[in-house]
Image (tube, grey):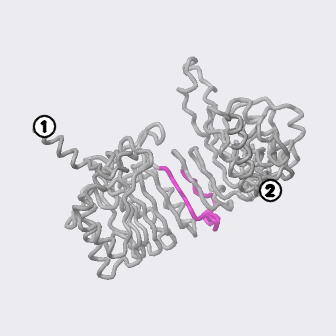
Amino acid sequence: MTGTHFQEAEEEETTDIGPLIDSLKCYIKRCPNEILFAVADYLYLEDQLDLCLVSRLFKYIGQDRIYREIQLRRPLDSYVKTIPCLLRTPSSQPHLAKIVKSLQIFPISREVQFDLADFLSMPFGALSLLPAESYFINEPILTGYLLTLLRGLRRLDIGVYLDPYDRNEDDDPYEEPWEVVYQPVSHPLSHLFGREMGDKDLHAIPGLQNLRELCFRGQRVQWEWLTLPLQRIHLYDKAYIMSPADGSVRASKTLKSIEVDIHCSILMPQSRDFDWLPATLRKVDNLEEFEIGFGHGNSIYGYRSRPTRTQYGHGDILVKSMATASSTLNFLLALPVEEDDMSYLDYIEPVTNLRHFTKLKHVAICQDILLGKQYEQSNSAPITSMLPPNLQRLEIWYPTVAAVTRWLQQLLALFNGGYLTSLEEISIHAGTCRGDDYEKFSYTKHMFPIWDQICDAGINVGIYVSDGYLNPDWEDEEYDPLALDIVQHLTLE
């Protein structure tokens, strides 16, 4: 009976799925390539390599996912043979070079071995970029040659560094690699291409002709980069943009987004380290998005002073540096990039004047720069000058319940009176290192009628927290942290 039972089950199963399966048809081939590409995205690199060995179709799909985005994440990953090996593939297989859309690479100014056969296989255009009097090839030069091959490149994340092992007599010979600090070179373009490069020379590099996003890690960003057809540029670490030798040269009209990681001392009145910022924005005609991340870490930003009780900073200093973009900017983000210590925000005076930014529709800003640590209407600027008149979306980060609820009451009165009528959404992003946490906001909303009044006026209000801080207890409808606090208090009593 057991055998009969299994036989009947098999027949029954075959009967159910038989009409759906045809052994003479290959359903993989009938599947759209977009779905196969999506599946390949979930594979690890090793599995994508194996995928290329299955068939011509899967080789095409695997290679597309392998070479579309190439990453050498930090200088320590760029071992001596890494860049020559990376260069060999697009040099010998041009069809793979066309696939590469994103490149992250950090060459070090050091000599590397490069086979004569590989050298002779370079096209004439690449050979012309090499220094005339050079008896060896270093990594930045090979990287410059690589950029001549990647004609389809859209995103470049690059930093050129000095060789930390080019030691002086006073250096510690036993210093470990992870203790080494990689210092950026002073003139990246001349290291990449072996000579000084003008904007016309840079436009002649095939891999830069279609570049849309540049992420630069280093120090000096030569102005020639900004003449490329970029749409977005992100400056990391201590990078700053050098003024062009010709004052009449302007940035490309396609450049619409700039993001900078910068030291918090930019908010201090006497700081002169950031004069390059307004000078740069003055030459960007169509800037629409500006994102600025504050930090204070010595390892990243160097040793600079920061706002303290005896030396306050002010949000208006930042606003003044962006004044030249007031007629075009529609998105502004001003947030800390380091959450370990944000105590310097205690000594920042809030902004008082954004009303001249008439096209600004989306603002993401921390409470300390917008409202101050403790918002008091009598001591704060009026909302009519504090916020841009055509604002549609506002994000407040690291807020406190007391300050936000008081401020929302003033905002609602102005909204009902006909001001900020374009405002559609307010997002409250609760933090864990500063301000009140998500639980304090979410579980005390019923105590403040202003939340419902804002929603009834037609403004969507949301309270958010980063995914890394989600608490599984929040899914429990009976969970109430305030009740637990009361029980603990009574227990102690």
Asked if 166 appears above or below 161 in the picture, the reply is above
For marks 1 and 2, the one nearer the N-term is 2
The three-letter code of the residue at mark 1 reads Leu
The chief SS type of the magenta part is loop
Q: Position of residue 152 (x, y in %)?
A: 76, 55
As displayed, is residue 58 above or below residue 357? above
Camera sees residue 205: no
- Would you say the residues marked 1 and 2 are in contact, meaning their CB atoms lie under 8 Å apart? no
Q: Where residue 402 sits: x, y (%)?
A: 23, 58
Q: Name the residue at 89% across, 40% down.
A: 121
Could you tell me the amino acid type at mark 2?
A: Arg
Q: Tell me if residue 396 is in the magenta stretch.
A: no
**Residue 15 on image: x %, y %:** 74, 51
Mark number, residue 120: none
Span highlighted in magenta in the image: 240-261
Viewer-proximal residue among 107 and 11:
11
Tell me the residue that label 1 is attached to.
492
The picture quadrant where one finds residue 296 is top left
Dot 2 surroundings within 10 Å: few (below 14), some, or many (20 or more)? Answer: few
Q: Which residue is painted at 62% across and 62% down in the image?
A: 231
The residue at the far left in this view is 493
Is residue 246 shown in magenta?
yes
| Left or right placement of residue 283 versus residue 189 in this view | left
Task: Choose between 367 and 134: the one closer to the eye.
Answer: 367
Name the residue at 26% across, 47% down: 481
The residue to which callout 2 is attached is: 30
Give the answer, above or below, for where 96 lies relative to 204. Answer: above
C-alpha gap between disc 1 and disc 2: 69 Å
